[in-house]
Image: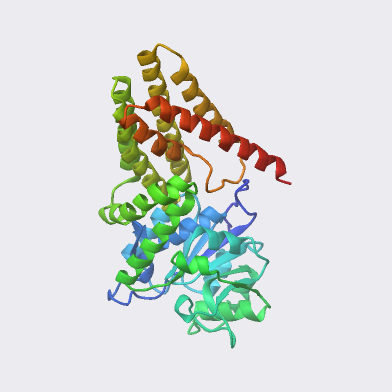
Amino acid sequence: MCFPHFVNSPNRIDMLAGLIFATEDAGDRAGTLAATLPFGGMTLLEYQARLLIGAGAGHILVAVTRVTPALLGAVNRAAKRGVPVDIVRSAEEAAARAHPLAQFVVIADGLVTTDDVIDRMAHEGKDAILVTQEPAASLERIDARNCWAGVARMPAQRIKDIAAFPPDYDFQSTLLRAIVQAGAEQVMLSAAAVRAGHGVEREGAALASRSNAVLAALTERRTSWADRWVFTRIARWVLPKVVEKGVPGWLLMIGGAATGAGATALIASGFAWGVAVAIPGVAALATGAALSALRGEEKCALMQEALIGLIVGAVVGALGLMEMRADATLDGVILAMVTIAATAIAERSQAVIRRWWGSPAAYLLIVTPFAIADRASWGLAAIAIYAFVTLAAAVEARREKP
């Protein structure tokens, strides 16, 4: 038997694998597996595989009772992420394909959850089970108080333990009992995870609702006040519509970059109000970053985050040059350079961001009303001071970090 090669990297846990159950039919679509229902511009199965790969899984097993064309398509697309994905029809077949030293993260049939939940379970002990006291967010009761919340971690041995059971035993339920009987640590599901959409759904309409909850949670990855109160709210409103229409992430990125370039060109032409044109561009990039995060395209998400900084830097720099031409002094350019340099250094400090700290998005919002009122120099002075104070706070926070 050939076992998959597990890749070692800083973001991967040695010998981690995933087991996804895809056996139940959708409640509102006869003949359709719940795992193949649409979710966030892909299928639920692809989303679950993306979570496992993001947590470091080097091999994924998909447990099924029947194979449909939609399931095969979803498995093939999931495998394109560079991790082997194999279909198994029984515990015996799963035991044969599982690496004997692998630690498995198990995802229940129809489960919607987030990266944080899967990452946490991937780092738990050899046997761990996610539990909740809320039946609505669970699958089945495991004791008098707690219900299974759909995620578990176990060694490959647990699959082997039940491989010899009769075929009429339910694979998922039997495996759960084996994990519990092995003395698995019970990890309580957090309220934040429930708010972020964690739960089991096997109906298309309800799954779409949970998809929106997960999308909303993804927009929270941007933490500054400007992002939380302005751009995150925009992304939370736009993202479900973008996913529903199947808008590709690259289109948002190109649109945001083009809008930012247009804003810079307007300012360079002497129209200070052009800074306002950059705001929808930043909103598009913030939305695109959340969409890329949903699809597991972390590099693309980071690229769009970086583009926001580049656009705001270009806008601020253009405002500084415009002020230099108008006043025949270097004041505007110096203020712009202070803002850009302080922001770059603060972000490289890797300090934990505080809500009130400045960010490229915040500087854009602050300078815009000044530019529209033809007081761009005042706005440049305001954001330069804000950026310097933020840098000082970041350096101090970094110094206090143990």
Q: Is residue 261 above or below residue 71?
A: above
Residue 391 lies in what quarter of the image? top right
Q: Position of residue 350 (x, y in %)?
A: 61, 40
On the rendered image, what quadrant is the N terminus found in?
bottom right
82 sits left or right of 248 in the view: right
Q: Position of residue 121 (x, y in %)?
A: 59, 64
Q: Is residue 32 above or below residue 46?
A: below
Q: Position of residue 181 (x, y in %)?
A: 65, 81
Instruction: Identify the residue at horizontal 46%, vertical 72% (top origin).
Output: 89
Of residues 393 and 13, the one nearer the viewer is 393
Q: Position of residue 213 (x, y in %)?
A: 40, 63
Res. 297 in view: no
Can you name the residue that lies furthest to the left here? 245
279 sits left or right of 135 in the view: left
Instruction: Identify the residue at horizontal 38%, vertical 19% (top origin).
Output: 323
Instruction: Identify the residue at horizontal 52%, vertical 74% (top origin).
Output: 149
Of residues 186 and 30, the one nearer the viewer is 186
**Coloring scheme of the render?**
rainbow
Of residues 143 and 237, the one nearer the viewer is 237
